[in-house]
Image (cartoon, rainbow, N blue to C red):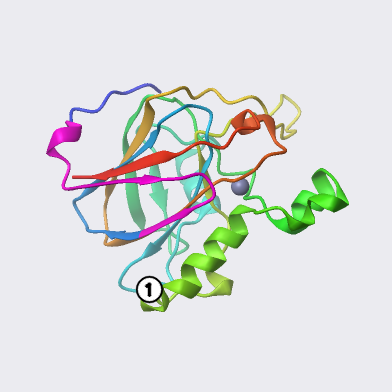
Amino acid sequence: MIKESILKPEDATFRETVPAGDYFLKVVKKGETVRILDLEGNQAADTLFFNADDSAERYSAVDTIREQGNVYLTAGTVLRSNRNNPMLEITADTCGRHDTLGGACATESNTVRYDLEKRCMHACRDSWMLAVNEHEEFGLGKRDITHNINFFMNVPVTADGGLTFEDGISAPGKYVELKALMNTTVLISNCPQLNNLCNGYNPTPIEVLIW
Ligand SMILES: [Zn+2]
């Protein structure tokens, strides 16, 4: 569902550009709104959310899908935790649909999907691991790297339940906006993937804004 934001970028209290292949890690406080902006289009922002006050509580794809009765995330979606608590609500979305089934790229999956020689290529899982290791103060570790959201990624489910990775439906300037319903740690890997047409084989920067 397409829903424009009423928030103005010039009023944001925080803005940061995240290059492709880099990560973003920050706490968004309850009541604040975070926007992820697809600057050049067709980028994939692989995202994990945690309760900032108790990192054992984290985003759960299963609980979110069951409670809303739909596999796609868009405006109106309430992202739920593994304790079925509401974590964030998608309050604006100019892309229209986001994936939470396809998972993140890893060096291991790159070898299975593409080629053995792709193993040395940078992947989202590496960026997340680097983030939690460089920032021990967030209390996150390897076991917290679980199922994620792929903002801007197009993974349509076929009529017979198949998963397909398709060319992106995002475009330059499209964004998704989420209001935090609890103090939430946001961990994004701006995907470095070069083998998947989900980002047009061309990883590009995103921008994160907070109000
Ligand atoms: Zn990736």
Q: Locate the N terminus by quadrant.
A: top left
**In the picture, residue 114 is in which quadrant?**
top right
Q: Residue at x 56, y 67 (%)?
A: 129
Residue at point 44%, 63% (across, down): 58
User: Where is residue 47 drawn, in percent x and y?
Assistant: 48, 51
- Residue 27's x, y, as percent? 30, 61
Q: Is residue 134 above or below residue 178?
A: below
Q: How many marks?
A: 1
196 or 164, which is in the foreground? 196
Residue 86 in view (yes/no) = yes
* Crowdedness near tag 1: few (<14), some (14–19) or many (≥20) residues, C-alpha within 10 Å: some
Can you give x and y, in whole percent of width and height, for residue 81 in the image?
43, 59
Q: Is residue 73 magenta?
A: no
Give me the residue at 75% from left, 57% from top.
120
| Residue that numbered label 1 is attached to | 138
Give the image quarter of residue 201: top right
Going 40% across and 31% down the picture, which residue do you hit?
A: 39
Which residues are the magenta region? Answer: 8-25
Compared to residue 36, the image places residue 106 above or below, namely: below
Residue type of the residue flagged with mark 1: Phe
The reply to whether residue 187 is in sight is no
Residue lying furthest right: 116
Q: Is residue 24 magenta?
A: yes
